[in-house]
Image (cartoon, rainbow, N blue to C red):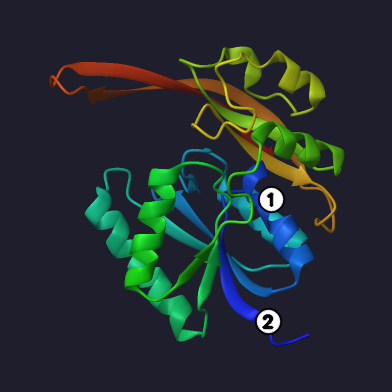
Amino acid sequence: MGRLIPAYFNWSGGKDSTLALYKILQNRQFDIRYLLTTLNEEADRISMHGVRSELLLAQAESLGIPSKKIHLPTSSDMQAYEAVMNRAIDELKAEGITDCIFGDIFLEDLRIYREQKLNEVAISAHFPLWKMNTLELVREFVDLGFKTIVVCVDSSKLDEEFVGRIIDHQFLADLPENVDPCGENGEFHTFVFDGPIFKKPIAFEIGEKVLKTYTTKNQENEPIEYGFWFQDLIPK
């Protein structure tokens, strides 16, 4: 076997990241040096997922891969986001890292954006789950023995009852037809707490369930309100 390629992994803590990492570790082509995660600076929680940083670090410890956290201000725009990300990537490149891995499955625009930005800084991007069937992927995830809990749902797509549930075959059967089985369109997000690549389960208690609403504007500059249900997880 030749030299492993030094890489970092874009880590959300959820099921797609975990399954992609599982496949990458099986492939034995890359030396995963870091799990790179963006967090909200004020709340110190994983962006979009709302998971506490203590649980992120517990995942990294159980996986045996160091965590590299990037804190983003709540009000940051794309320019500020890209500046922060570029600084982090420069640090990784200084350590000899040349490649990175994503758990994206089928969002073409997002992949193009990632590849363009990384090409500017001479980092090669890899997508081990790309274009795979999402129902087959999540069934494989469950059948492999991974355990994950839903920590966030888009309230316009899923009812409150879905947040806080463990993903199993019954959960998949209960999903509405318009919701992707992997939540690839942002319908739901998860936190993985056990599975074949973890040395030990991540211990947590179930906290409160919260609906958070936000306001944006449509193309006519009219305000639109949208919301997400979050399930808080408390480290044990």
Would you say residue 30 is visible in this rendering?
yes
Would you say residue 14 is visible in this rendering?
no
Instruction: Give the residue at x 63% y 36%.
Output: 190
Which comes sooner in the sequence, label 1 or label 2? Answer: 2
Looking at the picture, how far across and down is residue 157, in whole percent? Answer: 50, 16
Q: Which residue is mark 2?
A: 4
Looking at the picture, how far across and down is residue 183, in whole percent? Answer: 57, 31
How dense is the environment of label 1, judged by Cα within 10 Å: few (below 14), some, or many (20 and up)? many
Instruction: Give the residue at x 41% y 47%.
Output: 110
Q: Secondary structure at mark 1?
A: helix
Determine which of the numbered discs, if any, sits on residue 171 in the image: none
Q: Nearer the viewer, residue 115 or 75?
A: 115
Report the mark closest to the observer, 1 or 2.
Answer: 2
Q: Secondary structure at mark 2?
A: loop
How dense is the environment of label 2, judged by Cα within 10 Å: few (below 14), some, or many (20 and up)? few
Q: Is residue 218 left or right of residue 192?
A: left
Give how far apart the Cα atoms at labels 1 and 2 are.
20 Å
Instruction: Give the residue at x 64% y 45%.
Output: 16
Callout 1 amino acid: Thr
Looking at the picture, how far across and down is residue 136, in whole percent? Answer: 74, 35
Q: Which residue is mark 1?
A: 18
Instruction: Give the residue at x 66% y 17%.
Output: 175
Which part of the image, by quadrant, shows the N terminus?
Answer: bottom right
Which part of the image, by quadrant, shows the C terminus?
Answer: top right
Residue 157, compared with residue 185, is above or below; it is above
Looking at the picture, how far across and down is residue 17, in whole percent? Answer: 63, 50
Instruction: Please tell me in which quadrant of the rendered image residue 80 appears.
Output: bottom left
Callout 2 amino acid: Leu
